[in-house]
Image (cartoon, rainbow, N blue to C red):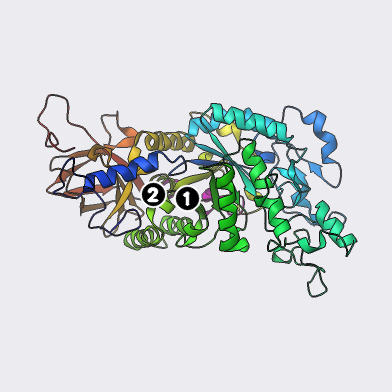
Amino acid sequence: MCATSGRRTESGALPLGYSRGVKHSPLTEIRERIEAREADWRAGAVVYQVFVDRFAPSADLDAKRGLYAAPRTLRAWHETPEKGSFVESAGVWSHEIDFWGGDLASVRGRLGHLNEIGADVLYLNPVHLAYTNHKYDASDYLEVSPEYGSRADLRLLVGDAHSRGLKVMLDGVFNHVGRRHHAFQAALGDEHSPYRSWFFIGSQYPNGYRGWADVANLPDLHVERDEVREHLWNGSESAVRSYLRDGVDGWRLDVASDLGPHFLRELTQAAHHERPGSWVVGEIWNTPAGWDRALDGILNMNARMTIIDFCRANADGATTASRLHDMIEDAGIEFILRCWTTLENHDTDRLAHLVPDEGARRVAHTLQATLPGSPNLYYGQELGMSAAADPYNRAPMRWDLVHDGHPEWVFMRGLYAARRELRALSKGDIVFLRGRKLLSFLRTTDHVFDTALVACNMEDHEVEETISVRDGRIMAGTVFKDALAFDRPDAMQAHVHMGFVTLKLPPRSARVFRMVMPPAGQHSPYKRMG
């Protein structure tokens, strides 16, 4: 099985019998495909997600204390979130208005951490003016919440990020606003208000107006109205376009499926018109197939379920390979490369909570880093932070764990260093290998020495299997070596014989192998292989 650019081929790798220099030869086709991906910063980018209030302590906390007046609460950094009670006077739950004081300036001070983990993109949970700590209840899209700073502070953050080679993406919450939004307040207070048409107001709704999931604090926007879309994304001064002019590189869209494909396509086109090459990714809890007609990518929760099922022993290697193959085949690898492979975020249990076994968790991390797609790391995931879903998964960042004595941090840095070095892992095609218990695949490009071999064993015992490598360019005698321990004499190796490779993996483990190039001056079966 293989997946290439949306169509099935025999192996997904370079076919035998090609002719060098012939226009439209298989080699030329593969090379052009890989070069196009390399020119697209979105394809296979590593995305690091930050919940601004919880990522780094503010240096100006004393000056900001007045912003957290009751019923809001300002917590100490060492405290952890707890589910609270409903606050009638505020119309929200108490844990929604517990704050830890992080801001855009404190994020700026920690951008070096993103470089250490090998991130390409900083993605911020919502920063616009809103009452709660999570900011999914916008009061004004065009202002930044004062707890976080100002639009000038956001521009400074974007500038610093760009200087470090990082792109910046914002969270767009355009299906609904917060109850405190000025337009909603005007619409409720005056039936003749021009903002009345922006909302669904009437006695047929439980709260007197339609809200997202019937939540009173989240009134739905009437995006079918031209004037609403002009404010959100179509107008030159709209939220989407004005932040892109500020230097932001793209948008992640909250509850994107609620906006529907037609309006998502319109929003994406508006973003591309304002900033060509910007990235619009939708929160779609579904299989990715078909969403390329509306978005640049989606939050790939389908891949998340597939990986976690495998790592919790709910699906074997063969079943998992079949699921992943079908997902990539159906959606097309070009789209999948721009989808975010997510294992945890602000809405889910932390990975370490779902997969407490360290070995199994490393398998999950490895698959997130090596399968086609853009790994979406949630702050603290690289440290093994563990918690159940909201609000527990939004605890303050554990900076005390960022040191070379912490095994998860050391492993994750090594994994993403290998990903940076191996071009195929971010930009390559994929060929699934047919094992019985092992899940294994190749990532390939137009250059055979780029080839990476990934193998995972989720059995409770050591597994040894001999598997066809399914790529005729990989010659007999080729040695693959553990990329995360490449310079160590005891690094695990795998040898190719007549198109087969024998893999022996310990229980609940994964390996990323890279090809060993023959030493200069020695005979090489690759001497005339391009």
Q: SS of the residue at dot 2?
A: loop
Quarter of the figure that contains the C terminus: top left
Closest to the observer: 166 or 500? 166
Q: Which residue carries the number 2 mark? A: 371
The single residue placed furthest to the right in the displayed view is 189
Closest to the observer: 61 or 227? 227
Q: Return the x and y of residue 127 as percentages of the image width and height.
A: 69, 42
Q: Return the x and y of residue 501 as percentages of the image width and height.
A: 19, 48
Closest to the observer: 500 or 247? 247
Which corner quadrant of the image does residue 100 belong to? top right
Q: Is residue 387 visible?
A: no
Quarter of the figure that contains the N terminus: bottom left
Which corner quadrant of the image does residue 23 belong to? top left
Q: Does residue 348 show up magenta in the picture? A: yes
Q: How many marks?
A: 2
Which corner quadrant of the image does residue 518 belong to? top left
Query: Measured along the vertical axis of the image, is residue 262 above or below residue 28?
Result: below
The single residue placed furthest to the bottom in the displayed view is 204
In screen coordinates, is 277 left or right of 438? right
CA distance separating discs 2 and 1: 9 Å
Q: Which amino acid is tagged 2?
A: Leu
Q: Residue at x 28, y 34 (%)?
A: 491
Q: SS of the residue at dot 1?
A: strand
Question: How crowded is the residue under tag 2: few (<14 C-alpha within 10 Å), some, or many (20+)?
Answer: many
Q: Which residue carries the number 1 mark? A: 341
Q: Earlier in the sequence, mark 2 or mark 1?
A: 1
In screen coordinates, is 131 left or right of 520? right
Query: Measured along the vertical axis of the image, is residue 395 above or below residue 268?
Result: above
Q: Which amino acid is tagged 1?
A: Thr
User: Mark 2 and 1 residues: CB-CB less than 8 Å, in contact?
Assistant: yes
Q: Does residue 441 show up magenta in the picture? A: no
Highlighted range, magenta: 339-361
